[in-house]
Image (cartoon, rainbow, N blue to C red):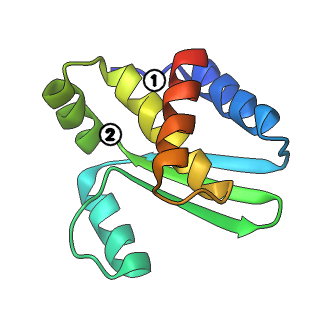
Amino acid sequence: MGLPIRRIKAMAKEVFKKEGRGGELSIVFVNDNEMKELNKRFLGKDKPTDVLSFQLSESIGEVIISTDTAKRQAIEYGISFISEISVLLIHGLLHILGYNHSKEMREKEEFYFRRV
């Protein structure tokens, strides 16, 4: 299953634009084995996760998404794979933008998911 790279890039640009943020962003797609290693290395958790995000500098960020986990979660939530990728991307972007898990972040996620 191919990923709509143009759509994904446009979504990221739109979220950054609406949040008044510019800069460079890497979006990386990995499998669960790779994600497990990254999660262990950076967060000390020996298991895969759906998304990791890192602010590498003031103007550079990186979002890493496990396609394996995204596929499972899409089935579990009854949504398309691309919709789940979108949810995870928005979640990761908001973390880069400084949001932490909160009601405000959840509202932003819902807003952007509907808009992009």
Assign the N terminus to one quadrant of the image. Answer: top left
**What residue occupies the far front of the structure in this picture?**
103
Image height of 61 relative to 10, above or below = below
Q: Does residue 100 appear to the left or right of 69 in the view shown?
A: right
Residue at the image point whose x is 75% and y is 39% from the top: 16
Q: Report whether 13 appears left or right of 3.
A: right
Q: Pick whichever, 114 or 104, lies toward us.
A: 104
Instruction: Tell me the amino acid under the disc marked 1.
Output: Leu
Compare marks 1 and 2 and give the one earlier in the sequence: 1
Q: Position of residue 100 (x, y in %)?
A: 53, 60
Residue 36 rendering spot, x and y as whole percentages: 27, 65
Q: Is residue 19 above or below residue 36?
A: above
Residue at 65%, 49% in the rendered image: 26
In screen coordinates, is 65 left or right of 46?
A: right
Q: Is residue 54 left or right of residue 34?
A: right
In the picture, the disc for residue 3 is 1
Q: Which mark is residue 67?
A: 2
Whether residue 28 is visible, yes or no, is no
